[in-house]
């Protein structure tokens, strides 16, 4: 059991939370959808696991490298 | 003539509109959100008004904020640019109600062309062939199968209430149709409406559009076409005029269709009539269908300006001031070939991931004969996540297509930025690719090329 922190690839706004804490996810599943420069950018699970926490809320402005969610894999 | 003109936009298009106004002696008023207080477009205008916080909904999309800015500044006319409120009929009406000249078509024309179904109905009345389809109330599987056969396979089945690719299925044959229909209807049910529509699927398509202009007295002309097939995420990245493979007779036919549509809706001002063409065969009138009309100036209007030698913003201002069209159809002459590329802060190697940030240094191509650069930012500016990633449009014009492509590729190779990723070198490779050099690429070409390009570069 490893805890993984998933970070944002770029400065963006949080558009939609797709996976609530407790959700089982597969590698590549969308956790959160960001919006930046008129584009939607999915933040995807880097591995199979379970969502431990979502660290952002819809509408938040976040920075590149900011933690978005944690998983246990 | 008209003015002062409030420019209800930002970035390169606001700068470009201000440049023509300045040449014509028309005072301009810029508007800006808090994120844009020191932006290039503010410096390009004679005066500036703050309209709100960075979020577009609170500023560039806020009708009350923009009308307030117009009242405070004493503006008499509003140019909406493209995007934001440019195709918002309520905004056009609100301007008129506030005593401002809206530099664009009448609200009724914006509404008539606003929805795809409504626009298709306009096309039917104007006798212009639209992409064959069925959007009738009879949703029985038998009727839908019969309509699909009439349209001809392959067909696309789309949930009327769908979006984002959900509720969409392709059926390549009558045998595949029942299963594809059931799947589309299942997904459509999630939107609370199982109704579907059918559309002819053009598997390999080119995007070809015709620039039209109309005046208040009913005069309508077209200024030739643009081929905007190289796209990523359904957004254009490279545009050119003339379209490869277009001859005078076909141009005249598409011009006839485009001007017929404009007349049908009582159009006034600048507009673009978009068509889809079958890319699997040479261009031919019977394989080109109307899809929609954009009731505004387009991003890619400079390629038309380069081949016609005209200033389309000047035409918009003159027509909004009540003047007649400056030229009749037989006075419009096209010369040479023009190509435009959209220079964006994005990373093609990471599937065009946007690259917001502060532009520490910026070198753009040097404008000169046959080379135009329409920039919206300068070194030191910060590209925020709130707005689109376009930094500049670079446009080349030359006697032949091959020379124009080469001139543009060379110009793009001279562009560089520090602090943000730029797609300049990628665009130069696109222009030098064998497919682009041959001409007539389809709308999937650019994303296919990106994948091949990324693979080749990681292998190298």
Image (tube, coloured by chain):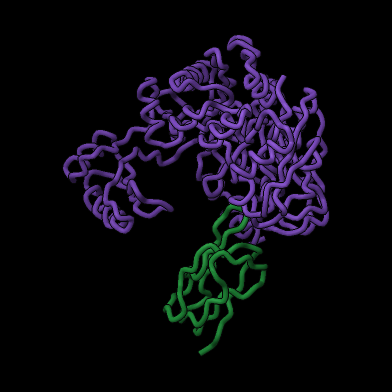
Chain colours: A green, B purple
Q: Which one is in front, B127 or B43? A: B43
Residue nearer the viewer, B372 or B403: B372
Task: Residue B311: name its quadrant.
Answer: top right
Asked whether the viewer can see residue B250, the reply is no
Query: Left or right: B173 with respect to B63?
Result: left
Q: Which residue does the image show at 61% across and 75% down from the upper left?
A: A67
Q: In this view, does B117 lie above or below A42?
A: above
The quadrant of the image that shows the C terminus of chain B is bottom right
Q: Which residue is drawn at 54% across and 20% down?
A: B247
Image position, residue B278 (x, y; %): 43, 33
Residue B132 appears in the rendering: yes
Give residue B296's quadrant in the image: top right
**Is residue B249 shown above or below B374?**
above
Q: Residue B85's spot in the image, x, y percent?
A: 58, 40
| x and y percentages locating residue B351 in the rendered image | 59, 57
Query: Residue at (41%, 31%) from the top-left corner?
Result: B119
| Number of numbered discs | 0
Q: Residue furthest toward the bottom?
A: A1
Q: In which quarter of the image is the N terminus of chain B?
A: top right
Q: In this view, does B308 lie to the left or right of B157?
A: right
Q: In this view, does A59 lie to the left or right of B393?
A: left
Quarter location, residue B386: bottom right
Residue A43 image position (x, y, % from top left)? 54, 68
Q: Please give the name of the residue rendered at 55% of the width and 70% of the height, measured from the top-left corner.
A: A57
């Amino acid at each position: 059991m490893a805890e993984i922190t998933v970070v944002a690839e770029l400065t963006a706004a949080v558009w939609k939370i797709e996976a609530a804490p407790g959700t089982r996810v597969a590698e590549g599943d969308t956790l959160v959808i960001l919006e930046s420069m008129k584009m939607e950018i999915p933040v995807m699970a880097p591995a199979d696991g379970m969502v431990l926490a979502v660290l952002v809320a819809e509408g938040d402005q976040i920075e590149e490298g900011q933690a978005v969610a944690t998983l246990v894999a | 003539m008209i003015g002062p003109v409030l420019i209800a936009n930002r970035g390169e298009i606001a700068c470009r509109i201000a440049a023509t106004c300045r040449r014509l002696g028309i005072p301009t008023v810029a508007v800006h959100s808090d994120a844009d207080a020191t932006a290039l477009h503010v410096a390009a205008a004679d005066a500036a008004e703050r309209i709100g916080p960075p979020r577009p909904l609170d500023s560039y999309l806020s009708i009350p904020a923009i009308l307030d800015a117009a009242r405070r500044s004493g503006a008499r006319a509003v140019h909406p640019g493209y995007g934001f409120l440019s195709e918002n009929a309520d905004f056009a009406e609100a301007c008129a109600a506030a005593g401002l000249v809206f530099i664009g078509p009448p609200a009724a024309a914006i509404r008539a062309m606003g929805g795809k179904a409504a626009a298709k109905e306009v096309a039917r009345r104007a006798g212009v062939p639209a992409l064959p389809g069925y959007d009738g109330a009879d949703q029985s599987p038998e009727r839908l199968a019969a309509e699909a056969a009439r349209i001809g396979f392959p067909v696309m089945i789309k949930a009327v209430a769908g979006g984002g690719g959900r509720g969409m299925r392709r059926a390549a044959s009558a045998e595949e149709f029942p299963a594809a229909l059931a799947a589309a209807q299942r997904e459509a049910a999630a939107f609370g409406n199982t109704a579907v529509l059918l559309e002819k699927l053009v598997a390999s398509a080119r995007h070809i559009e015709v620039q039209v202009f109309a005046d208040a007295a009913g005069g309508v002309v077209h200024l030739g076409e643009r081929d905007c097939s190289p796209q990523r995420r359904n957004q254009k990245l490279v545009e050119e005029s003339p379209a490869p493979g277009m001859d005078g007779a076909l141009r005249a036919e598409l011009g006839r269709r485009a001007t017929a549509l404009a007349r049908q809706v009582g159009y006034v001002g600048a507009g673009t009539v978009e068509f889809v063409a079958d890319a699997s065969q040479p261009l031919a009138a019977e394989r080109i269908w109307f899809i929609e009309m954009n009731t505004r100036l387009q991003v890619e209007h400079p390629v038309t300006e380069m081949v016609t030698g005209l200033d389309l913003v000047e035409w918009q201002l003159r027509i909004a001031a009540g003047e007649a069209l400056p030229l009749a159809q037989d006075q419009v002459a096209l010369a040479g070939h023009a190509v435009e590329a959209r220079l964006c802060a994005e990373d093609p190697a990471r599937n065009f991931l946007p690259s917001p940030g502060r532009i520490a240094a910026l070198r753009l191509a040097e404008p000169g004969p046959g080379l135009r650069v329409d920039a919206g930012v300068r070194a030191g500016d910060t590209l925020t996540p709130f707005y689109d990633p376009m930094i500049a449009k670079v446009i080349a014009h030359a006697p032949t297509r091959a020379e124009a492509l080469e001139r543009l590729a060379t110009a793009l190779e001279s562009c560089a930025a520090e602090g943000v990723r730029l797609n300049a070198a990628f665009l130069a490779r696109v222009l030098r690719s064998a497919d682009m050099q041959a001409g007539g690429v389809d709308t999937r070409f650019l994303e296919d090329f990106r994948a091949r390009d990324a693979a080749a570069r990681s292998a190298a």
